[in-house]
Image (spheres, rainbow, N blue to C red):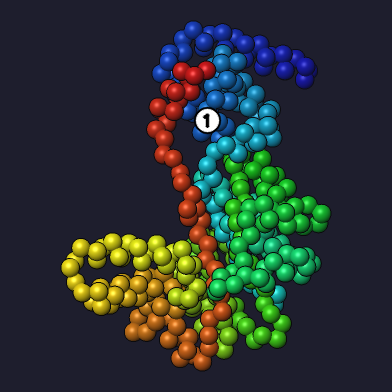
Amino acid sequence: AAHGTHAVRAIAATSHASAAAPSASAGEKTAMIKQLRERTGAPIVDVKRALDAAEYDEEAAFDALRAKGLAAAAKKAGRVAADGLVGARVGPRGAAACEINTETDFVSRNEEFQELVRGSADAIYERLGHDAEFAARVRKAANGAAYEANAEEASATTVAEETLDDFVKETAANVRENVTMRRAFVYALTEGSEEVIGAYVHGAISPGVGRQAAFVVAKGVSVDFANKVAMHVVASSPAYLRPDCVPKEAYEREMAVFRAQTADTGKPANIVEKILLGRMNKYYEEVCLENQKFILDDSMTVGKAVKAEGGELVAFARVKVGEGIEVETKDFAAEVRETVRST
């Protein structure tokens, strides 16, 4: 009976395809390509090939795309993943925050993906306790910054003899989108240093997982106050801890711009130098955490607020989903036309 059912379905499919092919206009074909692409998340080229092979029987093409399984998921690696989530974990060893990207916000709301992000932050944090070489690299971070692990290093983190890269690929296959580990920021607490870590996750959709995250390492302040500074970091996006942490290249680039702006003013050299000093101070107020106006009390800078608490800042990290990733905006109809022309 089962064999007969399959035969009936096959015959029906063949009959449907034979009837549909001659009547499908160019406009109808484009609509079917769009519909099947949205339904499967598969690349347009694969969708068109599947429909061509099935003589524009959508269900047969859908089944053919499903049958590709991981092969189809692997091809998604060519698409830009600029959405996603960040995860953060703080504990006695230190702190870790990671960014994992997806193509769409829809997948970011998927519970499996959220668990991947949370679990990855946890695993990278726990790595401080069992990977001595990794912990040593993390401890070498300087100039008020946390250690930044690139995609390869973060993905190599192991959990029960599997790497995070394995879990990322498995999730990509299940959600049918390109999923990529992008980076992680890590800080290892120094034993006996009396350092505390505050953290804040913005746009949290589950514990420790959201759209932006920051952690702040400090001494002589409460964790609650450090949490408030972390909130400030997310809101104000500082690039450096304080002026002496600004790289020489960045300083010289800004100074060159300011000098060019004052080159033809005709002002005396001593006046020009005062103008340059004022503009650099303004620059520091924009990019250095300690020089920024504190969002919870803009009558003082973050640095002064920390000193008022009797403490000092040691380091910080901030991560925002998709920041710095260039996304090409495409016209879908034009993309379909180009695909049809080239195949």
Identity of the residue drawn at 57% across and 20% down: 49
Identity of the residue drawn at 67% across and 52% down: 152
Q: Secondary structure at mark 1?
A: helix
Say left or right for 326 vs 8. left
Q: Is residue 115 visible?
A: no
Q: Nearer the viewer, residue 31 or 92?
A: 92
Quadrant (top left/top right/bottom left/bottom right) for the N terminus: top right
Three-letter code, disc 1 = Arg
**Location of residue 6 (image quadrant):** top right
- Residue 55 percent coordinates (x, y): 56, 13
Classify 16 as above or below 129: above
**Location of residue 118 (image quadrant):** bottom right
Identity of the residue drawn at 69% across and 35% down: 70
Identity of the residue drawn at 37% across and 78% down: 293
- Residue 275 percent coordinates (x, y): 26, 74
Q: Nearer the viewer, residue 288 or 201?
A: 288
**Residue placed furthest toward the front:** 269
Classify 262 as above or below 281: above
**Residue placed furthest toward the right:** 161
Residue under label 1: 37
Q: Nearer the viewer, residue 171 or 250?
A: 250
- Residue 31 percent coordinates (x, y): 44, 24
Say left or right for 70 vs 249. right
